[in-house]
Structure formats: structure tokens, C-alpha cells
Image (cartoon, rainbow, N blue to C red):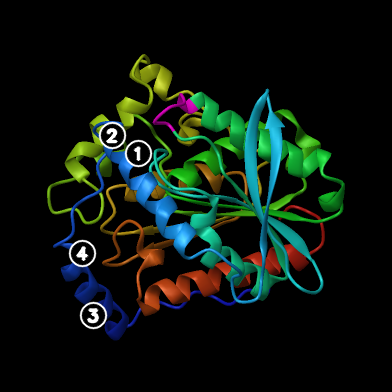
């Protein structure tokens, strides 16, 4: 593969991350303890997006609404001005309870311009009003539409991208697509940032202390259970709900990122061990980085995103076969 190697971080990179972490310590941690707070945050997000609506660096996004099991699922589609070499199917983060497809515009526009791809971001329903099975259904339905029903994309290779809760939904979707091998074969790779892959809590989630940044580490264990209040831990471990316990045979190569200070660190490390038994895995554990680090104004974030785009381009441009 022609993508450049991801070089180790130097001392200057680490010091910049550590300085930013000191600022994060003063911010409130994201918590999922009730439905009111996510609704409030979601409302504020919508207001901010409306006030900043318009074209993005000359690129215009459009919304297409598809129907999945009788439910309308909006897709936010951004196209390059020139040649199209592939499609990126994107699942946004937000702890399953906040966020939307528009939230990933900056990342997706960068991929559109650098990789000559169309991005399709899924506006799946949120868990404040929908059981998590509904979110999984929206995401799988969007993938099936893109891979089998959309005439525009039928000859294009596909990359799946997900961040945090979106990485969980992306991994779950890939496992569900094993029921349709011909569709799964069209996916050349997946890029997953610090996902949640075990809804019973990996060791780093269970051991997370009050010093965690961005996420409420001590509350994560209970927050995961709020997603599936009527299930036992044995039921929560069933894939694709907990992708960590799935069968990875036939899945595409994966590029995985996690931060050392993220309570979800072990989710990425453990799923990498499973995944690499079936396909190529490019795993990166970033020193001193917390959850959500690709959003922060650091050289590390810029390098990670640049490496991701190089990896996507290499996968899009290679022959249609699994390595």
C-alpha cells in the first residue's frame, strides 16, 4: 500500500497535547445520565449550525432522505467538483444521544478534496427517543442502500468511517453486512476513531477514574447500561450490539486510532487483536491523547487526519481485492 507510515510523536508534539489537556481539565465532562441534557445540547448544536449554514469552502452539501423499514433516514452527501474515485460512508459520534451528519462537515470536506471521494454521512436517529436497535437499523439500512440500491455509487469502491459512538455503529454495520457477502466485498477498508465495542465495559472503562478528560470516566459504566436497560450483560455482549465479540472473517482492512488517556482505550486495543486475525489492521495508540482528540487544535490531530486521508486514498486506488 502506498500510504505513508505514521511517524512516532516527538517531544514537541507531546508537550503541545499536554498543554491542551491542562485546558480540558477545566471543562465539564460529557455525561449520559438523563434524556434532558442531551436534548438541550442537541438543540444548541442545531442553532449553531443554522447560524453557520452555507457552502463549505466552495463545496455544497445536499440532503437525501431514504426509507429504512418504514423510517426516514436523512443522508448528508458532499461531492467533489471533479473526478470521483470512491465513496466514504460516515457515521458521526456523540455518545448515541447527540450529534448529526452536519457535525462532520469539516472532516468530510477535507476527505472530498484530498481523496476525490463522495462522502455520505448518516443522520441516524438518536437514543434519547429510539432504542439502540433503531440506530443500528438506520445505519445498516443506509449501508445497504449505498451498496445495492444507489445507481450513482454502484461501480465505486467504499470506505466506512466512524468516530466514538459512530465507530461502534460502523463496526456493528460491517458485522451485520456479513449476511450479504457481495455487498461487504465492495468495502475496501474502514477507519475507526476511539470506538465503543463492548457495551458491558472493557477494563479501561471499568477502571476509569475522576481524572479522565472530556468523558465522565466513572459514569461511563452506568451510561452504557442506559442504552440497553432491559438486557443482561450476556445479552449486551452479543454481536453486533457489542462488536468486540463478533466474527471478523471477511471484514475489510482497518485503520484504528485511540488515545492513551481515553477510558475507551481498551476497546480499540481488544478489537484490533480480533480483527487482525481476519484482515490487515493498522493500529495507533496515541500517547497523552484523550477521547475526541481529532477535534483539538494540535499537530497530532492534524497528522492523524492526514494519515487517515492517505490511507483512504491508497485503499480507494488499489485493485478490488482483499489483502
Residue at 15 percent across and 62 percent down: it is 25
Would residue 52 appear left or right of 113 to someone viewing this image?
A: left
From what the image shows, is residue 233 above or below residue 109? above
Q: Earlier in the sequence, mark 2 or mark 3?
A: 3
Do callouts 4 and 3 mark residues in contact (Cβ within 8 Å)? no
Q: Rate crowding at label 2 as few (under 14), some (14 to 19) or many (20 or more) other CA atoms within 10 Å.
A: few
The residues bearing labels 2 and 3 have C-alpha atoms spaced at a distance of 37 Å
Would residue 322 appear left or right of 154 to someone viewing this image?
A: left
| Dominant SS in magenta | loop
The mark found on residue 15 in the picture is 3
The residues bearing labels 4 and 2 have C-alpha atoms spaced at a distance of 24 Å
The residues bearing labels 4 and 1 have C-alpha atoms spaced at a distance of 23 Å
- Image x and y of residue 202, in percent: 31, 38
- Image x and y of residue 112, in percent: 66, 68
Q: Earlier in the sequence, mark 4 or mark 1?
A: 4
Residue 15 quadrant: bottom left
List the residue tagged with mark 4: 24
The residues bearing labels 1 and 3 have C-alpha atoms spaced at a distance of 36 Å
List the residue tagged with mark 2: 36
Q: Give the structural element (helix, strand or loop) at label 2.
A: helix
- Image x and y of residue 86, in percent: 76, 61
Pick the front one: 266 or 168: 168
Amino acid at each position: 500500500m502506498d500510504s505513508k507510515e505514521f511517524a512516532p510523536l516527538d517531544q514537541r508534539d507531546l508537550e503541545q497535547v499536554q498543554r491542551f489537556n491542562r485546558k480540558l481539565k477545566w471543562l465539564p465532562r460529557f455525561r449520559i445520565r438523563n434524556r434532558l441534557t442531551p436534548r438541550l445540547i442537541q438543540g444548541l448544536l442545531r442553532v449553531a449550525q443554522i447560524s453557520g449554514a452555507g457552502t463549505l469552502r466552495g463545496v455544497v452539501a445536499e440532503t437525501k432522505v431514504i426509507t429504512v423499514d418504514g423510517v426516514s433516514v436523512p443522508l448528508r452527501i458532499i461531492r467533489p467538483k471533479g473526478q470521483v474515485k470512491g465513496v466514504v460512508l460516515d457515521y458521526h459520534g456523540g455518545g448515541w444521544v447527540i450529534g448529526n451528519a452536519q457535525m462532520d462537515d469539516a472532516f468530510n470536506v477535507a476527505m472530498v478534496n484530498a481523496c476525490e471521494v463522495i462522502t455520505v454521512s448518516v443522520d441516524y436517529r438518536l437514543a434519547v427517543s429510539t432504542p439502540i436497535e433503531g440506530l443500528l437499523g438506520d445505519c445498516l439500512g443506509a449501508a445497504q442502500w449505498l451498496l445495492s440500491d444507489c445507481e450513482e455509487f454502484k461501480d465505486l469502491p467504499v470506505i466506512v468511517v466512524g468516530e466514538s459512538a459512530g465507530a461502534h455503529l460502523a463496526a456493528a454495520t460491517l458485522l451485520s453486512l456479513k449476511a450479504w457477502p457481495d455487498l461487504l466485498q465492495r468495502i475496501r477498508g474502514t477507519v475507526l476513531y476511539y470506538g465503543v465495542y463492548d457495551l458491558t465495559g472493557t477494563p479501561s472503562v471499568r477502571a476509569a477514574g475522576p481524572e479522565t478528560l472530556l468523558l465522565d470516566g466513572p459514569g461511563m459504566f452506568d451510561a452504557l447500561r442506559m442504552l440497553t436497560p432491559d438486557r443482561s450483560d450476556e445479552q449486551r455482549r452479543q454481536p453486533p450490539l457489542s462488536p468486540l465479540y463478533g466474527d471478523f472473517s471477511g471484514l475489510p482492512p482497518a485503520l484504528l486510532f485511540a488515545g492513551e488517556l481515553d477510558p475507551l482505550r481498551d476497546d480499540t486495543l481488544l478489537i484490533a487483536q480480533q480483527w487482525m486475525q481476519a484482515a490487515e489492521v493498522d493500529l495507533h495508540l496515541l500517547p497523552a491523547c484523550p477521547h475526541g482528540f481529532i477535534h483539538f487544535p494540535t499537530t497530532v490531530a492534524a497528522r492523524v487526519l492526514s494519515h487517515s486521508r492517505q490511507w483512504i486514498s491508497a485503499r480507494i486506488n488499489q485493485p478490488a481485492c482483499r489483502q
